[in-house]
């Protein structure tokens, strides 16, 4: 006779693992590093690295709490995602000091490794031309998104950037949950929560940065979750493309004089632009022909 | 001459003895259009929810006189699962359950066959989600007949149970939403390969 948990306990445990644990881990790690390692000086590479470490560890903690700490190397390719976050943390923390000369090799190594490991079972099934087509399109789209963030996000630490991470990962979470896989969706939600932890930690330690190492961890997990959704969960392609458009909201920083706006006005515009594709994706998935619920 | 005749007789007898087991074991091919492979799991501890695989193939080497010499080899396309609910099927194909894109095939290969009461106890290796575990299928001959083309048809019916968590399929187990124990029901019709 198998035991059945109380539904409210199920929801509480899932919420703890996918939201509270990553917020606490990311926030606490970033706060501790900020307090004892970064110090008070804003704009230091240490501040960016501290936030990235917090976000990556917050994601790993939530992910492994949800999915269990599995064998290494993982049998299921989806279980690579915490390792992708850690790889990105190491690569882009190291590349941070070297400008574009550090960014481009780090990006090539990250994309090559992540795409290969995440799509290895399908690469074996595809014809070589087909594989080149899939990998080429994904690599270009992902590199473009990464470069847009690098180009558009200002050098100074803006408080709303972690919130852009929250909305971006929420988009990846919602499209997966609504169209096929609760576990992939929850994993994306874990990263959204970790970004929330960094947002909160910055109130206590404003020197925590949100530069290249931090947003690289965010974009790594975001891309991996959309790839999982597209290839392994069969999420509607239009919904995936719409979710992929959410981080393009970073382009608002190219509006002349936007940095002089109040944080509320700037944050409001950022949220509005980011939410448009997300809302369209949610409407698209919510209005699909409904079958009887099966949960 | 006498000696040569004796030798010929001996060789013929020996050849017949060696060939006998080969003649008694038949290699039978599963006719998927007259066969079903179903699976079932319990939903919130209440009822067994059934699904089926629509695409599979396999052979049964069947030796009625010596069942221990029988062999079973089945290959199932994970993507072909069907529970009569499109959204649930999509969820079942996803990494939460069968992860059909990464692991398109489920296979079963027998390693040992013994008689257990009136049934064949087929011990074998089930490969699912990249893991291979020992599973026992209780199989019995359900009947024999002749098809429209006059060919011999042999039917088998079998059942097995295993824990899906042994293969890393853990979604919903902890919460009791969907049972860890999975039942497999096999009803196959075979023709001579």
Image (tube, rainbow, N blue to C red):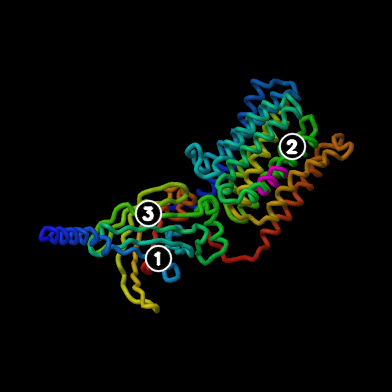
Q: Which residue lies under the disc numbered 2? A: A161
Mark 3 to mark 2 CA distance (whole Å)? 54 Å
Q: Secondary structure at mark 2?
A: helix
Main SS category, magenta section = helix
In the image, are marks 3 and 1 on the same chain? yes
In front: label 3 or label 2: 3
Q: Magenta segment range?
A: A133-140
**Residue B38 percent across, percent down from the top left:** 43, 63
Find the distance from the CA under tag 3 to the CA under tag 1: 14 Å
Residue A14 in picture, x, y percent from top left: 54, 46
**Chain under callout 2:** A
Is A77 in front, or is B111?
B111
Residue B163 against residue B149 in the figure, above or below: above
Q: Is residue B30 above or below residue B100?
A: below
- Residue B154 located left or right of residue A104: left
How dense is the environment of label 1, judged by Cα within 10 Å: few (below 14), some, or many (20 and up)?
A: many
Point out the image quarter for the C terminus of chain B. Answer: bottom left
Task: Give yes or no for residue A138 being in the magenta stretch.
Answer: yes
Residue depicted at x 87% and y 40%: A255
User: Which element carries disc 1, helix, strand or loop?
Assistant: strand
Q: Is residue A195 visible?
A: no
Across and down, in percent, residue A254 comes to 85, 39
Count of numbered badges drawn on the protein = 3
Look at 70% across and 26% down and name the residue there.
Answer: A47
Image marks 2 and 1: residues in contact by CB distance under 8 Å: no
CB within 8 Å, label 3 to label 1: no
For disc 3, the chain is: B
Q: Quadrant of the N terminus of chain B?
A: bottom left
The residue sitting at the right extreme is: A256
Circle 3 is placed at which residue position? B109
């Amino acid at each position: 006779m198998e035991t059945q948990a109380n539904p409210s306990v199920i929801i509480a445990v899932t919420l703890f693992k996918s939201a509270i644990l990553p917020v606490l881990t990311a926030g606490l790690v970033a706060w501790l590093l900020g307090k004892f390692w970064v110090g008070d000086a804003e704009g230091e590479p240490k501040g960016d690295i501290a936030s990235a470490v917090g976000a990556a560890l917050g994601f790993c903690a939530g992910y492994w709490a949800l999915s269990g700490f599995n064998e290494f190397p993982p049998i299921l390719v989806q279980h690579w995602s915490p390792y992708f976050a850690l790889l990105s943390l190491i690569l882009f923390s190291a590349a941070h000091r070297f400008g574009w000369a550090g960014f481009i090799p780090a990006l090539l190594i990250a994309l090559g490794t992540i795409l290969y490991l995440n799509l290895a079972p399908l690469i074996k099934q595809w014809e070589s031309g087909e594989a080149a087509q899939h990998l080429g399109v994904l690599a270009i789209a992902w590199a473009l998104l990464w470069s847009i963030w690098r180009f558009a996000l200002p050098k100074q630490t803006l408080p709303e950037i972690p919130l852009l991470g929250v909305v971006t990962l929420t988009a990846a979470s919602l499209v997966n949950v609504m169209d096929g896989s609760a576990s992939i969706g929850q994993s994306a939600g874990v990263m959204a929560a970790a970004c929330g932890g960094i947002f909160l930690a910055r109130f206590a330690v404003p020197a925590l940065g949100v530069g290249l190492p931090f947003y690289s961890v965010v974009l790594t997990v975001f891309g991996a979750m959309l790839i999982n959704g597209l290839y392994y969960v069969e999420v509607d392609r239009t919904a995936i493309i719409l979710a992929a458009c959410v981080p393009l909201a970073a382009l608002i920083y190219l509006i002349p004089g936007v940095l002089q706006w109040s944080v509320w006005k700037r944050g409001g515009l950022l949220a509005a632009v980011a939410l448009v594709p997300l809302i369209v994706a949610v409407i698209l998935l919510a209005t699909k022909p409904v079958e009887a619920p099966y949960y | 001459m006498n000696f040569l005749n004796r030798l010929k007789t001996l060789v013929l007898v020996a050849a017949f003895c060696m060939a006998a087991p080969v003649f008694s074991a038949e290699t039978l091919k599963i006719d998927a259009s007259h066969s079903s492979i179903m699976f079932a799991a319990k939903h919130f501890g209440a009822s067994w929810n059934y699904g089926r695989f629509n695409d599979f193939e396999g052979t049964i080497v069947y030796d009625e006189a010596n069942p221990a010499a029988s062999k079973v080899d089945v290959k199932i396309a994970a993507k072909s699962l069907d529970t009569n609910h499109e959204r649930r099927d999509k969820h079942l194909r996803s990494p939460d359950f069968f992860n059909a894109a990464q692991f398109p095939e489920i296979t079963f290969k027998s390693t040992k066959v013994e008689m257990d009461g009136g049934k064949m106890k087929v011990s074998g290796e089930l490969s699912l989600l990249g893991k291979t575990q020992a599973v026992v299928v209780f199989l019995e001959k359900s009947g024999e007949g002749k098809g429209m083309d006059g060919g011999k048809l042999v039917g088998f019916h079998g059942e097995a149970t295993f824990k899906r968590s042994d293969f890393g399929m853990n979604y919903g187990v902890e919460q009791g939403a969907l049972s860890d124990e999975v039942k497999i029901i096999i009803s196959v019709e075979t023709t001579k390969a």
